[in-house]
Image (cartoon, rainbow, N blue to C red):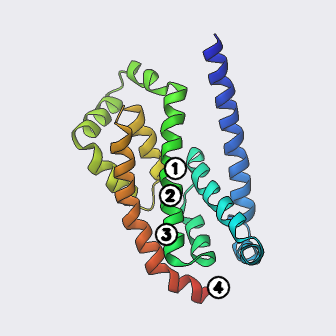
Amino acid sequence: MRRAMKRSIFLMLWALLIVVTLSIYWFYLADDLEATLEQFQQLAEQHYLWLVTVYLLFIAVRGLTLMPSTPLLFVGILLFPDWFAYLLNMLGILVSSWLVILAVKYTGYGKRLERLHNPQVQRLQRNMQAHGAPIIVTWSFFPLVPTDLIVYIATLLRFRQSVILGSVLVGEAVLNAIYVFGGAAILRSAF
């Protein structure tokens, strides 16, 4: 009974985090990106360490809400030197993936998945067990799908945490290198 109550409280807090993150995301990134970037640049001049901390925290927590990290990465490119933006983003993505793994394990979704005898779930399990790491790497590299979704799936299918995090690291490292080092000049010229 106590465990079910803790799980319910955790899920309610998770839902609240999703609502707050979506609101912040919409207000600051989707609504008026140019004004937000100007505010962040002013903040960076006055409170650089605080901005780095908030940036890293936001990247780490956004994985629990399945929000993409790409818009945040572009903000980071404009605020930080290229290598530093790259390292911050990679650290944030790894922490985000780790938090997703912990959240999935804590909620007990894996046990619920095992009880399903859905043919699509069983096919996904077979494919992931046969080609797990390459699927995670490829999924992490593909920019149109959230990496955190494959982390959820791999965790539900009981992949080792080291395999999940290592695969995410490889896929995201390549994608983020392209974004940061290839897109930095384009973004800086636009803003």
Q: Write down the residue under mark 2.
A: 91
Q: Reading the chain from its start, which is encountered first: label 3 or label 4?
A: 3
Crowding at dot 2, Cα within 10 Å, few <14 / some 14-19 / many 20+, comes out as: some
**Whether label 3 touches label 1, CB < 8 Å:** no
**Whether label 1 touches label 2, CB < 8 Å:** yes
Q: Quadrant of the C terminus?
A: bottom right
Question: Along the horizontal axis of the image, is 27 left or right of 81?
Answer: right
Q: Residue at x 42, y 25 (%)?
A: 113
Q: Quadrant of the N terminus?
A: top right
Q: Position of residue 107 (x, y in %)?
A: 54, 27
Indicate the amino acid at tag 4. Phe
Q: Reading the chain from its start, which is encountered first: label 3 or label 2?
A: 3
Indicate the amino acid at tag 1. Val
Crowding at dot 4, Cα within 10 Å, few <14 / some 14-19 / many 20+, comes out as: few
Mark 1 vs mark 2, CA separation in Å: 6 Å
Q: Which mark is residue 191?
A: 4
Crowding at dot 3, Cα within 10 Å, few <14 / some 14-19 / many 20+, comes out as: many
Residue closest to the far bottom: 189
Question: Along the horizontal axis of the image, is 116 left or right of 104?
Answer: left
Q: Residue at x 55, y 60 (%)?
A: 69
Q: Position of residue 33 (x, y in %)?
A: 69, 72
The image quarter containing residue 42 is bottom right
Q: Write down the residue under mark 1.
A: 95
**Does 181 appear above or below 141?**
below
